[in-house]
């Protein structure tokens, strides 16, 4: 016979999952009932229980047992110090839901410190979604610094300028990099990086107490290609060179080794530390990013991960 505490724990797990599907993933109670294999009335009660037990605020505030187990296994498998796994909605097409909220909560844990903290950030859709979830604060004691340029290929300000969004939201001094992601030539790169103001930003980034980065793919669907930072022939050359992923423009292979030459010779982003010694948290959940996320973990380009249970399962099945 199951112990009463086990039954109660399972019911809270179900309530937390139902609450996540309703408040974060945006499912209806009918959809929740179908996904959990329960009646609509039961789904409604589970959502109500999530609220009454204070498992739900705006973000999930209850550690689902399976997610805890997966995060612990990932920490052991890849020798990382931090990992958070959030539930996965099997029918959702979103590439950010759940992970962006969890990342915002982790960022806020640093920002509530009264002692000065330097936060470094990459760019991209996941980090922009994270920035939109950060609660307004008053943090003049902290610094938010960019790892990557905020200039789009056409010279306009990038829509994925995360540092300015976060800095404005939490009223903290922020340090963008007024550069494109990749220079046109190696000579242009050396000229741009010689600017004194940029050297200050790069030095701040190297001192960061915590860094948040997205993990991108290197293929025909790559964000660098979609956003016009690289050409199709450059992507094909990277693929031939073994590239599977990129972090702030730096391409790496399946083992996390940085690609020699090619676009990496012209990347203007802050150089990646390998292996990382400070806290660097990678964010990613989309299945096409599996090889990139695994490579970043294998190569010690990140030592922290926020993902969902579906990606966690893939990373552990290897």
Image (tube, rainbow, N blue to C red):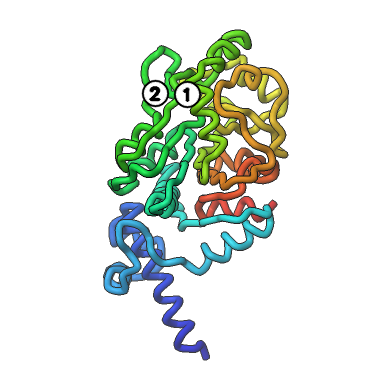
Residue 187 is labelled as: none
Q: Quadrant of residue 54?
A: bottom left
- Seen at 64% across and 40% down, the residue is 301
Badge 2 marks a residue whose secondary structure is loop
The image position of residue 183, as x and y in percent, is 55, 14
User: Image height check: is 6 above or below 119?
Assistant: below
User: Image height check: is 72 above or below 46?
Assistant: above
Badge 1 marks a residue whose secondary structure is strand
Residue 102 can be seen in this image: no
Q: Check whether the beta carbons of the residues at disc 2 and disc 1 lie within 8 A of each other.
A: yes
Does residue 36 appear to the left or right of 257 in the view shown? left
Which residue position is annotated with label 1?
149
Mark in the foreground, 2 or 1: 1
- Seen at 63% across and 28% down, the residue is 251
Of residue 35 and residue 287, the one placed in the foreground of this image is 287
Does residue 213 appear to the left or right of 155 in the view shown? right
Residue 158 is labelled as: 2
User: Image height check: is 257 above or below 18?
Assistant: above
- Seen at 67% across and 59% down, the residue is 76
The answer to which of marks 2 and 1 sits earlier in the sequence is: 1
Of residue 152 and residue 15, the one placed in the foreground of this image is 152
Does residue 276 appear to the left or right of 107 in the view shown? right
The image position of residue 30, as x and y in percent, is 30, 61
């Amino acid at each position: 016979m199951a112990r009463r505490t086990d039954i109660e724990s399972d019911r809270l797990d179900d309530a937390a999952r139902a609450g996540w599907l309703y408040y974060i993933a945006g499912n209806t109670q009918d959809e929740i009932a179908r996904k959990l294999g329960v009646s609509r009335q039961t789904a409604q009660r589970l959502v109500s229980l999530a609220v009454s037990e204070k498992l739900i605020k705006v973000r999930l505030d209850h550690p689902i047992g399976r997610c805890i187990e997966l995060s612990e296994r990932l920490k052991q498998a890849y020798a990382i110090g931090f990992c958070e796994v959030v539930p996965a909605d099997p029918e959702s097409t979103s590439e950010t839901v759940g992970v962006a909220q969890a990342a915002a909560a982790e960022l806020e844990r640093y920002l509530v410190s009264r002692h000065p903290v330097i936060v470094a950030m990459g760019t991209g859709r996941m980090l922009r979604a994270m920035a939109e979830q950060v609660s307004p604060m008053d943090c003049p004691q902290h610094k938010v610094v960019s790892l990557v340029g905020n200039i789009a290929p056409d010279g306009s300000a990038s829509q994925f300028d995360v540092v300015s969004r976060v800095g404005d939201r939490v009223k903290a001094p922020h340090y963008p990099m007024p550069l494109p992601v990749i220079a046109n030539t190696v000579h242009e790169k050396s000229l741009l990086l010689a600017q004194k103001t940029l050297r200050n930003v790069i030095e701040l980034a190297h001192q960061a107490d915590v860094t948040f980065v997205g993990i991108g793919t290197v293929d025909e669907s790559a964000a660098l290609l979609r956003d016009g930072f690289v050409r199709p022939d450059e992507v094909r050359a990277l693929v031939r060179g073994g590239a599977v992923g990129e972090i702030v423009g730096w391409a790496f292979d399946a083992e996390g080794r940085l690609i020699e030459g090619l676009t990496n010779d012209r990347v203007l982003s802050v150089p990646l530390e390998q292996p990382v010694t400070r806290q660097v948290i990678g964010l990613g959940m989309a299945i096409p990013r599996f090889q990139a996320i695994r490579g970043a973990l294998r190569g010690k380009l990140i030592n922290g991960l926020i993902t969902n249970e579906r990606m966690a399962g893939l990373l552990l099945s290897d």
